[in-house]
Amino acid sequence: MSQKPSSIVAIYPGSFDPITNGHLDLVQRGARMFGKLIVSILRNDAKEPLFSVEERMDMLREVVGVYSNVEVDCFDGLLVDYAAARSATVLLRGIRAISDYEYELQMALMNRRLRPEIETVFMMANEAYSFISSRMVKQVYSLGGNISGLVPPSVEARMHHRMHHRMAKTKTERG
Ligand code: PNS
C-alpha cells in the first residue's frame, strides 16, 4: 500500500441490526487509523431485519457523530464495487472469536479475487466486547434479558420502543 494511512478511505460494511458496543469500538479504532471511515449497511439483506436500513442509518449517525472523519452510508450489490465507487482501498472487518475466522477468510479472499487492489483489514474489538453479536443482543432482549452495556443507550431505547410496539401489535391482532 503506497498511500499514507491518513489518506486512506476505508469501508466498514455490515448489517448493524442493531449497532453494538463491539461495532462502535471498531469504528473508534478505524477512525483513528484511516483518513476516512465509511460505515455502510448492506441494503438487500436476505435476513429479515429488526430495523429498516433507514432506522439503522439513523442509529449509526446518532453514535458516530463524535468522529469527524466517519460517514454513514448504505450499499447494495458487490461490496468491492461499492468500495471502488467510493474510492476506498480498505475493507474493515472485526474478528471476535476463532469461529468468525472461516467466514471472514472466505469473504476476504473472494473480495480480493474480485478486486485485488482492495485490501481487507481485520481488527479485534476490546475483549470486553468479544462475545457480543447483534443476533444475540436481539435474542436476549426479546426474552427479557438485560442488554445495557452491550449496545449504546440510544440503541437500547429504540429496541425498547420497537419490542414494545411489536408486543402491542401482536396483542391487538390476537384480539
Ligand atoms: O455484518 P455482516 O452481516 O456479517 O456483513 C456481511 C457483509 C454485508 C459484509 C457481506 O454480506 C457483504 O459484503 N455483502 C455484499 C455482497 C458481496 O459483496 N458479496 C461478495 C463477498 S462475500
Image (cartoon, helix red, strand yellow):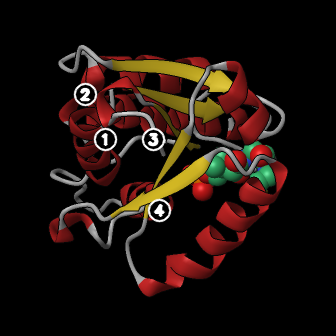
Q: Which residue is mark 2?
A: 154
Residue located at (70% from left, 41% from top): 174
Mark 3 vs mark 1, foreground winner is 1
User: Residue 129, relative to residue 43: is it above or below?
Assistant: below
Between 3 and 118, the one nearer to me in the picture: 3
The amino acid type of the residue labelled 4 equals Gln
Q: Which residue is mark 4?
A: 139
Mark 1 vs mark 4, foreground winner is 1
Q: Are marks 2 and 1 in contact (CB under 8 Å)?
A: no
Checking the image for residue 126, the label placed there is none
Q: CA distance from mark 4 to mark 2?
A: 18 Å
Mark 2 vs mark 1, foreground winner is 1
Q: Which residue is mark 1?
A: 30
Horizontal side of 160 relative to 41 (left or right) equals left
Q: Are marks 3 and 4 in contact (CB under 8 Å)?
A: no
Between 109 and 51, the one nearer to me in the picture: 109
Q: Secondary structure at mark 1?
A: helix
Q: How far across and how far down the image is residue 22, in percent?
A: 29, 54
The crowd level at tag 4 (other Cα within 10 Å; few <14, some 14-19, many 20+) is few
Q: Which residue is mark 3?
A: 18
Residue 171: quadrant of the picture: top right
Q: Secondary structure at mark 3?
A: loop
Residue located at (57% from left, 29% from top): 88
Mark 3 vs mark 4, foreground winner is 3
